[in-house]
């Protein structure tokens, strides 16, 4: 492939490299630039053009590239030999010996630079011998005023940490760049569909795009299927042994087994694989799904019988070479018939030890062979429930109808209900022969599902009664959901908290639905630390066992705790992780979407909030409580942000109506009632009913936070000095929890009220406090609102940036950040602060996320600015 195609879309990179080499040539001091990119990204072409440009300008250019050399200084020796400079052989490999040789090599470069500028060009630095890379690091640390430039490239991580160089990353081509290249190559303006197809086929890598376009032009195939068609056509044009090697590699994906499977020697197999890679027939370096298209095309050269025979031989070869059962099972699942006893045994073994998705594939094959095996279906459903609940429910239903055992039917009904959040089989499963424990479990699951359903929740809460004891898992499950029922019905706080703690008495039990109910009660009752402990354990456990759905539910609940404490960055991270896992799993969890939308509004990401809320069909959540009220609240605040107060009031009125119609006295709804009061007041509507309800709920569950909520609601709906007294008391209450967001809201209200009565000095004090609190909590939207009011009363506060941004860091994160920015290593930071290395890494990761940066270099620049 020519350099012209490789350099397509690399204009900005070429400009950056030229800037540095030109500066060095013109006597502005030595310069170094490192071009990073994957294979085919065009980095070698960039270096070749830089070398040619410098040569034309009269620079002495020394070029070399790494090819996997291992002998010390092999590449450096080849580089300097072009200037007639020899590199002495190392008599020993001590650090002192290396230092003497490195110093002499650098002196030779400086001497050469006194005659004319020098440009050292080293391609594929990661493929050079380590001693050469260390010499490059030696040179980078000594660059001064000499007219020397270094242009380096790197594909994979280095074994040596390089000193500072200007780094240029070769990003994949953009959609417009791909369209431009298509137009240039195929001589017609592509439409958006075809451009997107080519972008996905090539991954935006110039060399791959060139190959794809050449193949498409030759095949005259412009459909998405063209990838497979082209791959098959090109493979059929190659010799028989290459076809055998290609199909064998696609099937086993292990180069060492290609020879035995393809029936060729190891050397022939190795050479054949290299040839196939040069022709881009294996899809290396492309996104996984595009690589799969290429490889599917490779297998298209085989007819079904040949493909099955190849898979069968691959299974045997993998087994003979001692590979694990999963690798063998991956071949067996493709066979039209699994008809040998050893095959079923392998599938069973692989399912027992594999990851959930892999285990599901193996078990599906076994269920196809034995559709009436109830135990097998239950095992498959258990694996599927972790990532595909809809499919899991289908197999649980099939198993339920294939057994008459009362206890097994009850257990299947419980699994089905929890997986699909449906009552479908709970009534059918009740039988006089059931044990008391199973009846208790059926009651617990029934109540858990009823608590989600606005149509029956009030009746379910009224009937909820705890078991006589909490000695068994089933009884503790019932205690967990009864605790939430007591809370949602406005029952005694002490009783609900007692039930919740009893439900969590067994630290080994993992029942996400019951644990989450108990954690919710603890959070609303003001025991956020206990709730976080429970949810941290749940998230870790479900991450470890692959139960994605339970992990997502736990993440959502943990996000709610972080939000209640005013830690929006952590809350947003948990909610975003849950939403992404939901999308990856292909299942629905509307509460995660609504929560992330609400958090996006708080953090100032209005476009994302709007997009997320558009994904939710209100009719789908209308019967779900409390999801529907949270959806209406988020929709109302979105209207506020968009300056549509009439719509905001309409949505909050609907929210108020929903909460009343459900018929519960739920203290967990207090924050929502406060938002109803605030928005109704902003819109000039009567908020008396909402204020009264907030006060009633606060008195029913008398915590410091609930009292502060009640005072804040009254302060919003009241005027005069009395309102300020209530707001001041509310701020003190939120500070004691602590709840940074609510405290910031209250300080903002105080600032607005003092400004309204003509006391700008008092107003400024509260507004500055509001800005600081909001930034610490991560709410840029609230901070901006407070700052706007502050400026209106004569305050002076610059746009929150570096210093204000650091306010969002915790004290521990700030200590780690300061040391890291000063160049202290993670290990040294850990020793200095008497914490673990892992703790330092976690603090840095969170700090990077909060500050919107991704490296130590950016961190130093951020603090310096």
Image (cartoon, helix red, strand yellow):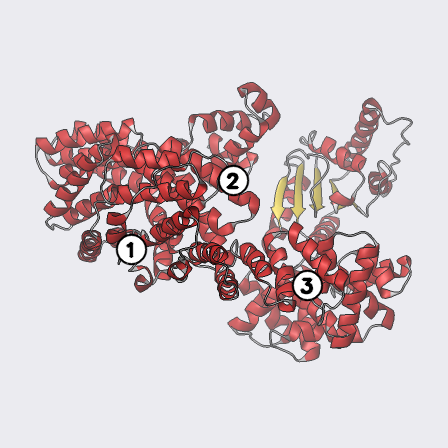
Q: Secondary structure at mark 2?
A: helix
Residue furthest to the front? 433
The numbered disc on residue 208 is 3
Q: Earlier in the sequence, mark 3 or mark 1?
A: 3
Horizontal side, residue 211 vs residue 629: left or right: right
Quadrant assignment for the N terminus? bottom right
Structural crowding at the residue carrying mark 3, measured as other residues with C-alpha within 10 Å and reported as few (<14), some (14–19) or many (≥20): many
The residue positioned 58% from the left and 20% from the top of the image is: 831
Circles 2 and 1: CB distance less than 8 Å? Answer: no
Query: Which percent across, then down, holds residue 50?
Result: 70, 50
Circles 2 and 3: CB distance less than 8 Å? Answer: no
The numbered disc on residue 859 is none
Circles 3 and 1: CB distance less than 8 Å? Answer: no
Say which residue label 1 marks. Answer: 628
Residue furthest to the bottom? 220
Say which residue label 2 marks. Answer: 540
């Amino acid at each position: 492939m020519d350099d012209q195609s490789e350099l397509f879309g690399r204009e900005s990179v070429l400009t950056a490299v030229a800037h540095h080499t030109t500066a060095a040539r013109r006597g502005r001091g030595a310069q170094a630039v490192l071009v990073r990119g994957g294979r085919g990204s065009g980095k070698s072409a960039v270096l070749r053009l830089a070398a040619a440009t410098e040569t034309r300008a009269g620079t002495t250019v020394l070029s070399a590239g790494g090819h996997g050399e291992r002998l010390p200084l092999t590449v450096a020796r080849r580089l300097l030999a072009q200037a007639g400079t020899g590199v002495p052989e190392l008599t020993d490999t001590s650090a002192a010996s290396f230092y003497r040789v490195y110093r002499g090599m650098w002196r030779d470069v400086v001497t050469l630079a006194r005659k004319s500028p020098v440009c050292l060009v080293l391609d594929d630095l990661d493929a050079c011998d380590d001693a050469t890379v260390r010499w490059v690091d030696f040179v980078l640390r000594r660059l001064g005023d000499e007219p020397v430039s270094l242009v380096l490239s790197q594909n994979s991580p280095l074994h040596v940490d390089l000193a500072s160089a200007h780094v240029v990353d070769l990003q994949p081509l953009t959609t417009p760049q791909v369209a431009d290249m298509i137009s240039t190559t195929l001589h017609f303006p592509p439409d958006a569909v075809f451009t997107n197809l080519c972008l996905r086929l090539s991954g935006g890598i110039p060399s791959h795009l060139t190959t794809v376009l050449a193949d498409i032009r030759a095949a005259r195939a412009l459909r998405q299927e063209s990838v497979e068609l082209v791959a098959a056509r090109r493979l059929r044009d190659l010799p028989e042994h290459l076809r055998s090697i290609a199909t064998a590699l696609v099937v086993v994906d292990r180069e060492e087994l290609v020879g035995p499977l393809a029936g060729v020697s190891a050397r022939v197999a190795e050479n054949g694989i290299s040839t196939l890679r040069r022709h881009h027939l294996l899809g290396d370096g492309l996104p996984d799904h595009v690589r799969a298209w290429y490889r599917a095309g490779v297998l298209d050269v085989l007819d079904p019988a040949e493909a099955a025979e190849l898979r069968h031989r691959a299974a045997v070869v993998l087994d003979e070479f001692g590979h694990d059962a999963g690798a063998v099972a991956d071949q067996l699942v493709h066979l039209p018939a699994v008809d040998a006893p050893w095959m079923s045994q392998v599938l069973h073994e692989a399912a027992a030890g594999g990851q959930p998705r892999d285990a599901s594939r193996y078990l599906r094959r076994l269920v196809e062979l034995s559709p009436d095996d109830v135990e097998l279906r239950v095992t498959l459903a258990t694996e599927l429930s972790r990532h595909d609940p809809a499919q899991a429910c289908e197999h649980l239903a099939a198993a339920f109808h294939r057994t008459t055992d009362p206890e097994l039917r009850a257990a299947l009904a419980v699994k089905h209900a929890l997986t699909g959040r449906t009552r479908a089989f709970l009534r059918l499963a009740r039988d006089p022969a059931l044990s008391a424990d199973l009846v208790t479990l059926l009651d617990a699951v029934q109540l858990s599902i009823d608590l989600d359903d606005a149509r029956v929740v009030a009746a379910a809460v009224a009937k909820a009664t705890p078991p006589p004891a909490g000695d068994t898992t089933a009884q503790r499950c019932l205690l967990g959901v009864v605790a939430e029922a007591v809370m949602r019905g406005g029952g005694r706080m002490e009783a609900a908290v007692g039930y919740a703690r009893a439900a969590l008495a067994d630290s080994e039990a993992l029942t996400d639905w019951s644990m989450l109910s108990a954690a919710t009660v603890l959070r609303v009752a003001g025991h956020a630390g206990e709730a976080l402990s429970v949810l941290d354990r749940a998230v870790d456990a479900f991450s470890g066992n692959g139960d994605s759905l339970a992990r997502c539910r736990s993440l959502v609940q943990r996000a709610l705790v972080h939000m209640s404490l005013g830690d929006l960055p952590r809350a947003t991270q948990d909610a975003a992780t849950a939403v992404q896992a939901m999308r990856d799993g292909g299942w629905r969890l509307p509460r995660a979407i609504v929560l992330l939308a609400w958090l996006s509004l708080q953090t100032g990401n209005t476009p994302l909030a709007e997009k997320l809320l558009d994904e939710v069909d209100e009719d789908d959540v209308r019967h779900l409580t409390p999801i529907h009220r949270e959806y209406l609240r988020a929709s109302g605040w979105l209207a506020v942000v968009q300056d549509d107060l009439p719509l905001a009031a309409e949505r909050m009125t609907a929210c108020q109506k929903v909460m009343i119609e459900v018929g519960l006295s739920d203290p967990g709804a207090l924050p929502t009632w406060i938002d109803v009061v605030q928005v109704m007041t902003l819109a000039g509507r009567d908020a008396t009913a909402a204020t009264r309800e907030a006060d009633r709920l606060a008195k029913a569950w008398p915590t410091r936070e609930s009292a502060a909520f009640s005072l804040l609601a009254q302060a919003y709906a009241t005027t005069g000095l009395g309102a300020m007294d209530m707001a001041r008391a509310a701020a003190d209450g939120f500070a004691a929890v602590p709840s940074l967001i609510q405290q910031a809201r209250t300080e903002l209200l105080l600032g607005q009220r003092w400004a309204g009565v003509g006391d700008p000095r008092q107003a400024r004090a509260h507004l500055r406090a509001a800005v600081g609190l909001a930034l610490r909590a991560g709410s840029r939207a609230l901070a901006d609102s407070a700052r706007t009011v502050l400026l209106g009363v004569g305050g002076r506060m610059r746009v929150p940036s570096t210093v204000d941004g650091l306010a969002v860091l915790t004290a521990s994160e700030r200590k780690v950040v300061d040391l890291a920015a000063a160049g202290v290593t993670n290990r040294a930071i850990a020793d200095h602060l008497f914490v673990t290395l892992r703790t330092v890494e976690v603090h840095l990761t969170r700090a990077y996320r909060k500050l919107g940066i991704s490296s130590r270099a950016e961190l130093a620049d951020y603090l310096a600015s």
